[in-house]
Image (cartoon, grey):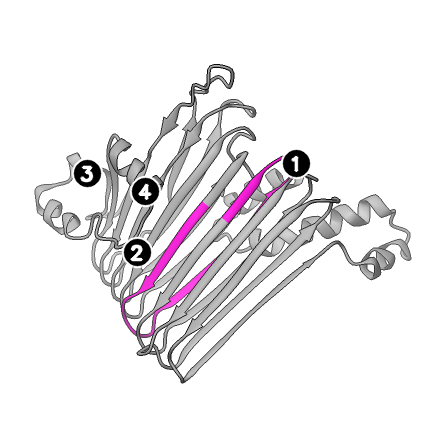
Amino acid sequence: MDLPDGVYFGSFSGLPEELTNRVSDFVGNFDSGDLFWSINGMGAPELTVIYVPAGCKVENPIYLRYFAGETGDRESKRLPVSNPRVFVLVEEGGEIGIVEEFVCKDEQGFYWTNPVLEVVVLKNAKVKHSYLQKESMAAAHIKWSFVRQEAKSEYELVEVSTGGRLGRHNLHVQQLGPDTLTELTTFHMCVNEQTLDLHSKIILDHPRGSSRQLHKCIVAHSSGQAVFDGNVRVNKLAQQTNAGQLTRSLLLKPRATVNIKPNLQIIADDVKCSHGAAISDLEEDQLFYFQARGIDLETARRALISSFGSEVIERFPNREIRDQARDHVKGLL
């Protein structure tokens, strides 16, 4: 892979001597986590590092494809576990795209993926993060993403998650300077006996910060369950903050379940903040509109369901990833 001068992509042990101390200043310097975070810290065989020097703009995204090749046995309760860990440091004024894709060899494979991604975005830097989770329907996928942003930086996440008997994304973002932008756009879809969770936390500590979050999910199985626990905290010094949070859910089967807890904690007094939540089946008026124009009910339902998720999929910055995600979702539906 051709990378601009100064950009490093490889193992921590292979870092050039002049970068080792710089990266070490930030690695692991996060103030929260849980048991799964700790298990990853103990079990990760190596730390993968992506380093972007000051002012460098990497045109093509770096693609990280995680492939679950080993599967276990439910009868013997043998559960293979993998603990990939990636650290990204983008210096002042740098820009990069990161693509994470989680796939498997066996669509009914029994295994556990327990990844961690740490991202440090320094002043005026930009990171576009694309995340596709397509694990086996019998797997567990529990992911931690920690992001720290300094002044005038931008972090954008677009996520599509459809796999795993249990899938959970713990996403923590902290703004460490003024005029900082955070944008999170996520889509979860349960088409089987699954539980898919998103637990997000955005902490704004400085003036003129901006955060936008859109979460959408579809539960298309009577034993499927989706969870959204989204917390936005606007602390006292984060004046003139603009924070918005919206979650929308489609329940397509009887007894399908979604649990949502949008949460705004506002201590500052000069802010513009909003949040909203909606849960429903497909609108009868919309279905009637299609049928009145000669489109049968099944085709109308498929079109409306596909368009519901496309709002998220279309935000992937890379065309190949958009096409891949769109085809995958259509195949599942």
Q: Residue at x 25, y 48 (%)?
A: 4
Residue under pointer 4:
37
Q: CA distance from mark 2 to mark 3?
A: 22 Å
Q: Residue at x 91, y 52 (%)?
A: 294
Q: Earlier in the sequence, mark 2 or mark 3?
A: 3
Is 22 in front, or is 217?
A: 217
Q: Secondary structure at mark 4?
A: helix
Label 1 neighbourhood size at 10 Å, few (<14), some (14-19), many (20+)?
Answer: few
Q: Which residues are magenta?
A: 169-197
Q: Earlier in the sequence, mark 1 or mark 4?
A: 4
* Residue 295 position in % (x across, y down): 87, 50
Q: Earlier in the sequence, mark 4 or mark 2?
A: 4
Q: CA distance from mark 1 to mark 3?
A: 38 Å
For residue 99, which quarter of the picture?
top left
Q: CA distance from mark 3 to mark 4?
A: 19 Å
Residue under pointer 1:
331
160 shown above or below 261:
above
Q: CA distance from mark 2 to mark 1?
A: 35 Å
Q: CA distance from mark 4 to mark 2?
A: 31 Å
Q: Earlier in the sequence, mark 1 or mark 3?
A: 3
Residue 58, can we see it? Answer: yes
Q: Is residue 171 magenta?
A: yes
11 shown above or below 57:
above
Is 85 left, or right, of 199 in this rendering? left
Is 254 left, or right, of 218 in this rendering? right
Residue under pointer 3:
12
Label 4 neighbourhood size at 10 Å, few (<14), some (14-19), many (20+)?
Answer: many
